[in-house]
């Protein structure tokens, strides 16, 4: 494997250099992005300046036959939080880059002038060219143009208008199996950093590149067989997620009284049935879409789908639970078609659906629109695509929106919006939100699994006891999983079934010729978190930043009428291992 570095600010125009993995040998995904950012990016630099770097890294097992291994990590200093950022996505480009032998693509520097660039990577090398015809196009149009130019087999990594405008909620899109820009590294404004480098699209064609070959093919193939069997037999990864997608959680979290409704005012949404995963799957099937579908080749869980409009035409991929919540229940909206349209708009403009839903929720609380008004929500999002002054404020995220409108109830940590679980109703996820190096982030340590679904044991969601240990262990494990390129949803089966966890270890051992144990995985997770924490400390973060907004400690959340009860001094012990 090698690293492709592209200096966008080089004299005479952008310049590509291939270097050996060097210090980053044996690293992948979040392990590589966070280590590289911590080592090479000055923590106090401006996130949109020339010293920031955008690192795009396939996982350790990406490009192999291992099932579920197609996640790709994007790392940089975040324009949204000001701290280190890793956001990962599915789609095809991870497998393609890895098969071409790239451990990472690093965008460095910043070009002078206002040219916009595209980068083409295939087995013959790298070509960088200015293409101003792409300016201010949405992701769908960009991909159509790239398909015409580079053929039907390419994969595309791109930004929409939001990334070009360097908005702090801008995402980076990765194409799926149908070559649609539906998979996003959404969080933290990574798209704004790509926009600051003036790169609109990275097109990858892996024609002629074979699968990556394992050190021990027999062990690797046998482990993959056990791996797939384990994922298929677990009720969450084998039944719930394939049948209803992640949106299966709407009813579950609502029932638990932890479904943040109307900007985190209540824990239950009366109309949740209308936007539930069950209703969504039924709608998709009835309209000739798909209720079960993968976001990349080799996914056996297939939590995604295809959402068609009322006339049976493709509208968007199956909106995920977080999206349906953010743009739905959080804004009091109970119309699936409007939510699907908002999802499509976010994918096209290149916006994080969680951040945008939270921002619209704050805007509604601030009086800019009424809760439940789907058309008003669509109109607000259109402003972002147009780049109007209001649109740019909205595209800067919930924290900025709250300041502009003088709203006190702003659900953010380290400047990043909280996802679809109220931390008063699920206290374990509150610990993760507060302490994660990433800002408000459910994927950093998904305590919901244990608090609500009783996966990997059980810790009472409404009590503070046991939540620190739970979040700590999950944050460590997640950091390691994010390095492998495996989709995080494998964790349900791996946490519950020791033989499935062993199969994952054997995949790594068979591929790299190692003898890793569970302790080594934990050590890897700790190492990643340590480098991220060190970066954040140098960027000015203190323990005061590891806190939830005040209202979670003061306002009772119906129906359980609870506040967040984990003490500050206990939050400060999460990283004491
Ligand atoms: S389980 Fe879902 S998110 Fe994960 S790889 Fe499969 S389709 Fe993508």
Image (cartoon, rainbow, N blue to C red):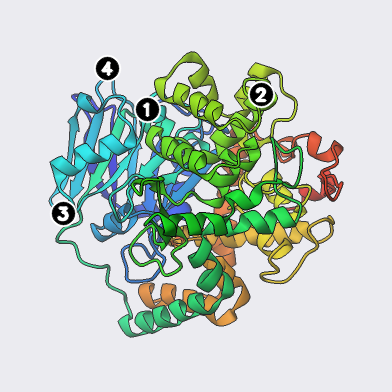
Q: Which residue is mark 2?
A: 402
Calculate the distance from the C-alpha at mark 2 to the C-alpha at mark 4. 34 Å
Quadrant housing residue 403: top right
Camera-side mark, 3 or 2: 2
Camera-side mark, 3 or 1: 1
Q: Which residue is mark 4?
A: 113
Decide which of tag 3 and tag 1 comes sooner along the chain: 3
Decide which of tag 4 and tag 3 comes sooner along the chain: 4
Q: Nearer the viewer, residue 346 or 150?
A: 346
Marks 4,1: beta carbons within 8 A: no
Q: Would the CB of label 2 be found within 8 Å of ligand 1?
A: no
Q: Which residue is mark 3?
A: 123
Report helix, strand or loop for mark 4: loop
Q: Quadrant of ligand 1?
A: bottom left
Q: Position of residue 272 (x, y in %)?
A: 65, 49
Quadrant housing residue 464: bottom right
Q: Position of residue 405 (x, y in %)?
A: 67, 18
Q: Which residue is mark 1?
A: 161
Camera-side mark, 2 or 4: 2
Marks 3,1: beta carbons within 8 A: no
Picture layout, residue 408 above or below residue 438: above
Camera-side mark, 4 or 1: 1
Calculate the distance from the C-alpha at mark 2 to the C-alpha at mark 1. 23 Å
Mark 4 surroundings within 10 Å by alpha-carbon count, few (fewer than 14), some (14 through 19), many (20 or more): few
Decide which of tag 4 and tag 1 comes sooner along the chain: 4
Residue that appears at 38% across and 60% down = 70
**Residue 71 seen from this side:** yes
Report helix, strand or loop for mark 2: helix
Mark 2 surroundings within 10 Å by alpha-carbon count, few (fewer than 14), some (14 through 19), many (20 or more): many
Residue 78: which disc? none
Picture layout, residue 167 above or below residue 576: above
């Amino acid at each position: 494997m090698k690293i492709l570095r592209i200096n966008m600010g080089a004299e005479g125009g952008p310049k590509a250099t291939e270097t050996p993995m060097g210090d980053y040998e044996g690293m992948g995904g979040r392990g590589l992005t966070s280590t590289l950012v911590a080592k090479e990016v000055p923590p106090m630099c401006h996130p949109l300046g020339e010293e920031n770097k955008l690192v795009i890294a396939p996982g350790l097992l990406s490009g192999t036959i291992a099932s579920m291994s197609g996640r790709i990590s994007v790392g940089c200093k975040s324009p949204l939080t000001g701290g280190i950022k890793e956001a990962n996505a599915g789609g095809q480009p991870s497998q393609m880059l890895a098969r071409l032998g790239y451990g990472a693509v690093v965008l460095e520097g910043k070009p002078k002038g206002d040219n916009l660039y595209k980068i083409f990577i295939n087995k013959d090398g790298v070509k960088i060219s200015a293409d101003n015809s792409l300016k201010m196009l949405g992701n769908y149009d960009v991909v159509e143009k790239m398909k015409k130019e580079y053929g039907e087999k390419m994969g595309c990594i791109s930004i929409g208008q939001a990334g070009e405008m360097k908005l702090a909620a801008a995402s980076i899109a990765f194409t799926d199996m149908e070559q649609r820009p539906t998979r996003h590294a959404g969080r933290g404004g990574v798209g704004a950093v790509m926009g600051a480098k003036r790169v609109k699209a990275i097109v990858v064609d892996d024609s002629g590149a074979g699968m990556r070959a394992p050190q021990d093919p027999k062990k690797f193939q046998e482990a993959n067989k056990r791996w797939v069997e384990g994922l298929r037999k677990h009720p969450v990864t084998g039944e719930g997620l394939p049948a209803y997608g992640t949106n299966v959680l709407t009813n579950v979290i609502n029932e638990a009284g932890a479904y943040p409704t109307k900007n985190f005012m209540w824990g239950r949404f009366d109309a949740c049935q209308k936007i539930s995963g069950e209703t969504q799957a039924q709608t998709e099937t009835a309209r000739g879409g798909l209720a079960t579908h993968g976001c990349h080749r080799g996914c056996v869980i297939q939590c995604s789908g295809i959402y068609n409009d009322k006339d049976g035409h493709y509208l968007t991929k199956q909106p995920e639970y977080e999206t349906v919540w953010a743009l739905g229940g959080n804004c009091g909206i109970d119309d699936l078609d409007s939510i699907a349209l908002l999802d499509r708009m976010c994918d096209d403009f290149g916006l994080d659906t969680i951040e945008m839903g939270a921002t619209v929720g704050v805007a509604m609380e601030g009086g800019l629109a009424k809760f439940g008004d789907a058309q008003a929500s669509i109109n607000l999002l259109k402003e972002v695509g147009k780049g109007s002054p209001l649109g740019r404020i909205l595209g800067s995220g919930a924290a900025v929106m709250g300041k502009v409108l003088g709203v006190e109830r702003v659900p953010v940590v380290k400047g990043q919006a909280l996802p679809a679980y109220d931390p008063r109703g699920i206290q374990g996820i509150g610990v993760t939100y507060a302490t994660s190096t990433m800002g408000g982030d459910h994927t950093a340590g998904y305590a919901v699994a244990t608090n609500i679904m009783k996966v990997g044991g059980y810790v009472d969601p409404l009590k503070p006891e046991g939540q620190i240990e739970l979040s700590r262990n999950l944050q460590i494990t997640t950091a390691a999983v994010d390095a492998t390129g495996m989709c995080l949803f494998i964790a349900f089966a791996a946490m519950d079934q020791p033989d499935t966890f062993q199969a994952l270890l054997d995949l790594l051992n068979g591929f790299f010729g190692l003898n890793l144990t569970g302790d080594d995985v934990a050590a890897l997770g700790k190492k990643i978190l340590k480098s991220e924490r060190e970066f954040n400390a140098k960027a000015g973060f203190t323990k005061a930043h590891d806190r939830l907004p005040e209202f979670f400690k003061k306002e009772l959340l119906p129906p359980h009428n609870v506040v967040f009860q984990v003490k500050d001094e206990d939050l400060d012990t999460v990283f004491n291992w």
